[in-house]
Image: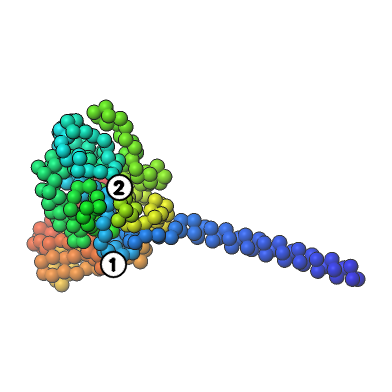
């Protein structure tokens, strides 16, 4: 009888022990699934912005201003692209002696075209390339910096002041900006096909035969949905990084400032946000009545957000604005009633003809 009791007790101990092990294993497995993309943010500020409508999905200290180091070369690049000719050659002058740190090792008397300089600027973060671009596009470097600040104002970068074309900050405060402004700048630049073509390249062979450059943005190799970005570092700013990624027609920009684990954070945050947010139809095209007036919204309106995102209408007698989560995504001016109806019918007819 005692042997049977002992055997029974041992069986229950073994069974319960095995069951507890299985339960603990299952719980650990669940925790791994939940945290597979979780990476702590080890930095000063960050932002996740949807790049087409500029709505902020997540962030921390998004308007805090600091030196942003070489990610400010994004502004240098877009000002050059919009005001220069890619095939135009420049002769290198004394301006290269005013640059130190990272470079593409060009020398006084060399000749190099703007296309090569832009690749050296954005892939290799060449400070010498930045100064050559600034001198030749702006006439001199101070005037080019004025062009940078004017462009910042035009884009709406209210937190930003640029003092040079390189991002160096040893001799002055450097180029000061915020995570929000740099995301706004990257979103603006992503509309430019020349800029996109450059920043998405992992390597570039110089047209002047001077060798091949490899992009410092390693996210292009490590994350399949990354389509571009720019790295930065100074002792004052620490590590700074801007990247953009596209998945399922959702285009996101992430900016991190003074972040020690920036590449790991960007990868994990992209996966988290692509799972969490999606482009949703919030208002179909059509004629809408507001306070007795008719307004034509001539396209389906989409918004990157969560399923709970809803559109709301606000307006006056002359215009109608569409908001989602307090963000204005569309505005339309009032037309004459007959004109509104006719234009809407032409839209529908065009869709019918095109299938």
What whole-number distance in Å separates the C-alpha atoms at marks 1 and 2?
A: 30 Å
Secondary structure beneath disc 1? Answer: loop
- Residue ID at (58%, 60%): 28
Q: Quadrant of the N terminus?
A: bottom right
Q: Mark 1 — residue?
A: 325
Q: Earlier along the polypeptide chain: callout 1 or callout 2?
A: 2
Image coords of residue 56 (percent x, y): 29, 61
Image coords of residue 170 (percent x, y): 25, 52
Q: Residue furthest bottom?
A: 291
- Residue ID at (12%, 49%): 142
Q: Mark 2 — residue?
A: 230
Q: Residues within 10 Å of mark 1 (few under 14, many from 20)?
A: some
The reply to whether residue 39 is visible in this rendering is yes
Secondary structure beneath disc 2? Answer: strand
Q: Nearer the viewer, mark 1 or mark 2?
A: 2
Q: Residue furthest top?
A: 209
- Residue ID at (13%, 54%): 150
Image coords of residue 144 (percent x, y): 13, 47
């Amino acid at each position: 009888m005692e042997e049977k009791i002992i055997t029974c007790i041992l069986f229950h101990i073994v069974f319960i022990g095995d069951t507890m092990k299985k339960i603990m294993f299952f719980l650990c497995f669940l925790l791994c699934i939940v945290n597979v993309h979780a990476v702590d943010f080890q930095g000063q500020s960050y932002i996740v912005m949807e790049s087409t409508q500029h709505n902020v999905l997540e962030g921390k200290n998004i308007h805090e201003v600091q030196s942003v180091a070489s990610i400010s070369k994004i502004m240098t690049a877009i000002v050059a692209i919009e005001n220069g000719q890619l095939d135009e050659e420049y002769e290198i002058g004394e301006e290269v002696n005013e640059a130190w740190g990272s470079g593409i090792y060009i020398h006084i008397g060399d000749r190099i075209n703007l296309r090569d300089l832009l690749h050296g600027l954005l892939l290799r973060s060449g400070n010498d390339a930045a100064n050559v671009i600034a001198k030749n596009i702006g006439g001199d470097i101070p005037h080019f910096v004025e062009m940078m600040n004017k462009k910042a104002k035009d884009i709406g970068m209210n937190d930003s002041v640029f003092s040079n074309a390189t991002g160096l900050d040893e001799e002055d405060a450097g180029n000061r900006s915020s995570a929000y402004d740099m995301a706004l700048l990257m979103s603006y630049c992503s509309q430019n096909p020349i800029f996109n073509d450059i920043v998405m390249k992992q390597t570039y062979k110089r047209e002047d035969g001077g060798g091949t450059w490899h992009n410092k943005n390693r996210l292009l190799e490590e994350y399949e949905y990354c389509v571009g970005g720019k790295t930065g570092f100074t002792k004052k700013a620490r590590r700074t990084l801007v990247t953009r990624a596209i998945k399922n027609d959702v285009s996101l920009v992430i900016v991190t400032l003074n972040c020690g684990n920036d590449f790991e954070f960007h990868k994990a945050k992209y996966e988290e946000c692509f799972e969490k947010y999606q482009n949703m139809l919030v208002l179909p095209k059509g004629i809408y009545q507001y306070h007795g007036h008719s307004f034509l919204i001539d396209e389906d309106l989409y918004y990157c957000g969560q399923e709970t995102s809803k559109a709301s209408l606000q307006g006056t007698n002359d215009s109608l604005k569409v908001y989602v989560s307090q963000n204005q995504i569309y505005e339309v001016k009032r037309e004459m009633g007959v004109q509104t109806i006719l234009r809407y019918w032409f839209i529908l007819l065009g869709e019918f003809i095109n299938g």
